[in-house]
């Protein structure tokens, strides 16, 4: 019999803090102690936000999806770790600190504390004891360790690269700091491109494996957006390569147009091709240097505008015709640092380039109509030794930048020894936390206490590297720290036995712009596998499943303070409560669709929760006064059977959708089940007052719905369960609901006892 039923109003501001305090007291979200049998757990990895400002609605969408999945898996009896950390280094925090003239470390700490308060208010079930900041010395010590490991493996190297430089501020600028028109964001003077030494991460050794593993990922719960980003970043092009015999040796050229290789009109070299220097001389070499400096790149958008340098030289093509040799970064954008056959007859980009050199390239040469004739007489395998092959657009990328708020690069520049790695025992190389950047010059280079050091190899007076690692490098392993107990991270970040329980992560949930991070995390996982630390992840994949969601917009446009369409999560929680915001953001759109935020989503979420809350508590009270008539209960048994079937079907659909992270469908199926429950009552009330047996079945169905609602609106769902009088705060049902709990056949003696 239901006892001590109370009917409080739905007041999110009172309910939610009470439930959150209970979760903390019970330690509901602490990483479970590993069982002795070593059973795998569910690690849900959400994106790591830049620690600058507050949470925005994109974060809310991200973390609400991940949290609903984590809570669902706990209800299924799985051990769950909801991991989280701040991507605290980088330009956004540095610019905000410059604006306020405070140390970036201070700004990051303020923002992080604020974000954590917001996350807890929204009910996210992170293990907050395992939260970390990438800017903590104990954390970036491992970024430096990873740098040294990859450097030792030959995967990090120093080379010249192009950067934007402001002569007035005497500093390099990130791309987003260069305003339209090529001026500095700070002083508004002209910015120029210069060459300077830059550190690169070599990813080419793992491109083929990343490619080959796509077949594996397609069999796992990777959503199509996530898969598409990996394919796009990889940039695989299938085709043939042909060895062209020139006076200075062999030049191997690629084309994706295997059936038209013999129709080539020119050869296009990448400015990063290893043999490009052999093809240029005199003024052409100066043009190449200008091209390499990126002087034209800022405005180039297509093949008609992209820079092209004519070497003035030619090489015999597949049919013996002399092919002009040109140089252009367009090759890199399509096939990587290679040589490509230009075939205007079948390739629009090649046709655009050919039209720019009419004196060198016969624009009236072979046309697409010739392809069928050509292919019929010369099969691909017989065209000048053509070989089937592939090329990848993805290539090595720079990992250093000339800003002060970042992980110090563990390299010492010695006048005698050159670049010398800092010994592992001397890590971390500590970034001065009192450093106040001004936007001018290089603050680290002006700190003798940081830059002046003896060479670790020979003892000669030397200088530390004053570039810092781009925050993208820190992100290469941001999925690891949460799997390691905080007390053990100083010594076992990559070797802790507990990590094997959580890795690879069962789910990564992130925005659709995270493809580059995930691609490079996949590369580094393979490197660490080969180095030994992650040998247990034999396929080198850090995530078993990945969901990428689209952005949140408002009024059809990206949210922006400038446009005045920013939605403040705090204001929504203040007015409607966290559960309303959670339900609204999940219901409004599927993850693959852009979420165009509107008041309609909030109204829906709030109306649903209030309606369910009120309906549930009214039925708890009505059950108290219900009477039992055995004959009447026997007549309504088919209706109770139907109710059980509805619940069984509805709960199964919710479970299936939630397992696939299609939370918008989960919410819709929950609301449909609510309608079915109400329909059951309406049908029976047409016959008069509900019998005690029917009222009991109705209440049980309501409680099952409340259990199923817990992953999505945990505060309200738990409040309903507690206020039924059947549970206390300490013994709430933690398992996924089972529709067989709905009583169909009636025990008249028990029912009579309950009535008395």
Image (cartoon, grey):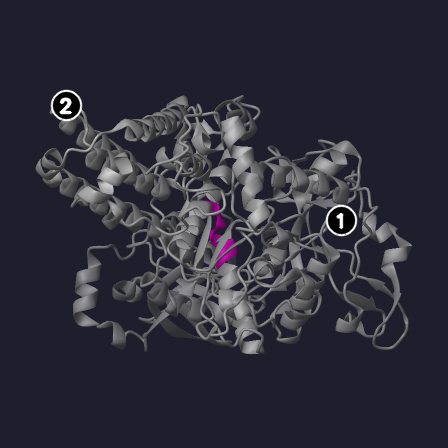
Q: Image quadrant of residue 677?
A: top left
Residue 550 lies in the magenta stretch: no
Is residue 387 shown above or below 449? Answer: below
> For residue 515: magenta?
yes
User: Which residue does the numbered mark 1 point to in the structure image?
Assistant: 404
Q: Is residue 8 above or below residue 128?
A: above
In the depicted view, which residue is nearer to us: 435 or 82?
82
- In this orientation, does residue 356 appear? no
| Figure quadrant of the C terminus | top left
Tell me where residue 180 appears, x and y as whole percent: 60, 33
Percent x, y for residue 708? 34, 43
Element marked by disc 1: loop
Which stretch is magenta?
511-518
Q: Where residue 498 sits: x, y (%)?
A: 56, 69
Residue positioned 82% across, 62% down in the render: 464
| Dominant secondary structure (helix, strand or loop) of the stretch shown in magenta | helix
Q: CA distance from mark 1 to mark 2?
A: 76 Å
Q: Which sits earlier in the primary sequence, circle 1 or circle 2?
A: 1
- Please tell me whether mark 1 or mark 2 is closer to you in this view: 2
């Amino acid at each position: 019999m239901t006892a001590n039923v109370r009917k409080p109003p739905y007041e999110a501001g009172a309910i939610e803090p009470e439930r959150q305090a209970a979760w903390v007291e019970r330690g509901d979200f602490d990483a479970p102690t590993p069982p002795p049998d070593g059973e795998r757990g569910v690690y849900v990895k959400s994106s790591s936000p830049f620690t600058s400002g507050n949470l925005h609605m994109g974060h809310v969408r991200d973390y609400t999806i991940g949290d609903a999945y984590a809570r669902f898996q706990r209800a299924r009896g799985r051990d769950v770790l909801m991991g989280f950390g701040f991507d605290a280094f980088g330009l956004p925090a540095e610019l905000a600190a410059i604006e306020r003239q405070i140390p970036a470390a201070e700004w990051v700490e303020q923002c992080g504390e604020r974000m954590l308060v917001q996350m807890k208010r929204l009910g996210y079930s992170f293990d907050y004891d395992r939260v970390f900041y990438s800017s903590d010395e104990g954390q970036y010590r491992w970024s430096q360790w990873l740098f040294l490991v990859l450097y030792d493996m030959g995967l990090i190297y120093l080379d010249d690269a192009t950067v934007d430089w402001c002569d007035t501020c005497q500093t390099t600028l990130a791309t987003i700091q260069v305003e339209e028109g090529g001026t500095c964001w700070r002083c508004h003077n002209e910015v120029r491109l210069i060459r300077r030494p830059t550190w690169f991460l070599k990813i080419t050794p793992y491109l083929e494996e990343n490619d080959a593993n796509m077949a594996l990922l397609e069999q796992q719960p990777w959503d199509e957006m996530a898969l598409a980003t990996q394919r796009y970043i990889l940039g695989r092009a299938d085709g043939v390569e042909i060895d062209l015999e020139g006076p200075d040796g062999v030049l191997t050229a690629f084309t994706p147009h295997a059936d038209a290789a013999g129709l080539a009109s020119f050869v296009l070299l990448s400015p990063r091709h290893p043999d490009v220097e052999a093809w240029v001389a005199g003024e052409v070499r100066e043009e190449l240097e200008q091209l390499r400096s990126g002087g034209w790149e800022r405005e180039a958008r297509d093949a008609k505008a992209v820079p092209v340098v004519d070497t003035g030289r030619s090489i015999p093509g597949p049919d013996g015709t002399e092919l002009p040799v040109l140089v252009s970064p367009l090759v890199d954008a399509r096939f990587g640092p290679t040589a490509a056959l230009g075939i205007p007859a079948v390739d629009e980009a090649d046709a655009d380039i050919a039209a720019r050199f009419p004196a060198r390239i016969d624009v009236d040469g072979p046309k697409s109509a010739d392809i069928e004739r050509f292919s019929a007489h010369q099969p691909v395998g017989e065209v000048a030794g053509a070989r089937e092959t592939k090329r990848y657009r993805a290539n090595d990328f720079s990992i250093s930048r000339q800003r002060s708020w970042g992980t110090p690069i563990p390299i010492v520049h010695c006048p005698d020894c050159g670049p010398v790695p800092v010994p592992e025992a001397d890590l971390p190389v500590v970034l001065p936390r009192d450093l106040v950047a001004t936007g001018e010059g290089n603050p680290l280079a002006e700190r003798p206490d940081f830059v002046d050091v003896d060479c670790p190899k020979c003892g000669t007076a030397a200088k530390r590297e004053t570039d810092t690692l781009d925050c993208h490098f820190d992100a290469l392993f941001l999925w690891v720290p949460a799997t390691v107990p905080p007390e053990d991270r100083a010594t076992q970040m990559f070797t802790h036995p507990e990590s094997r329980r959580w890795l690879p992560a069962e789910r990564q949930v992130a925005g659709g712009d995270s493809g580059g991070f995930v691609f490079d995390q996949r590369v580094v996982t393979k490197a660490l596998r080969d180095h030994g630390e992650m040998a247990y992840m034999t396929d080198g994949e850090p995530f078993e499943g990945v969901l990428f969601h689209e952005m949140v917009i408002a009024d059809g446009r990206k949210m922006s303070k400038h446009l005045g369409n920013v939605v403040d999560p705090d204001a929504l929680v203040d007015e409607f409560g966290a559960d309303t915001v959670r339900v609204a953001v999940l219901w409004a759109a599927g993850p693959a669709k852009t979420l165009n935020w509107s008041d309609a989503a909030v109204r829906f979420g709030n109306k649903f929760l209030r309606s369910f809350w009120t309906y549930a508590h009214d039925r708890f009270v009505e059950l108290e006064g219900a009477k039992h008539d055995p004959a009447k209960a026997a007549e309504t048994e088919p209706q109770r059977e139907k109710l059980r079937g509805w619940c069984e079907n509805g709960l199964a659909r919710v479970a299936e959708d939630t397992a696939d992270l299609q939370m918008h469908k989960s919410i819709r199926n929950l609301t449909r089940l609510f309608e079915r429950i109400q329909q059951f009552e309406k049908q029976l009330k047409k016959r008069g007052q509900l019998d005690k047996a029917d009222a009991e079945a109705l209440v049980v169905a309501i409680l099952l719905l409340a259990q199923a609602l817990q992953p999505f609106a945990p505060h309200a769902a738990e409040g309903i369960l507690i206020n039924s009088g059947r549970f206390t705060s300490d013994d709430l049902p933690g398992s996924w609901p089972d529709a067989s709990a709905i009583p169909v056949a009636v025990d008249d003696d028990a029912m009579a006892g309950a009535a008395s």
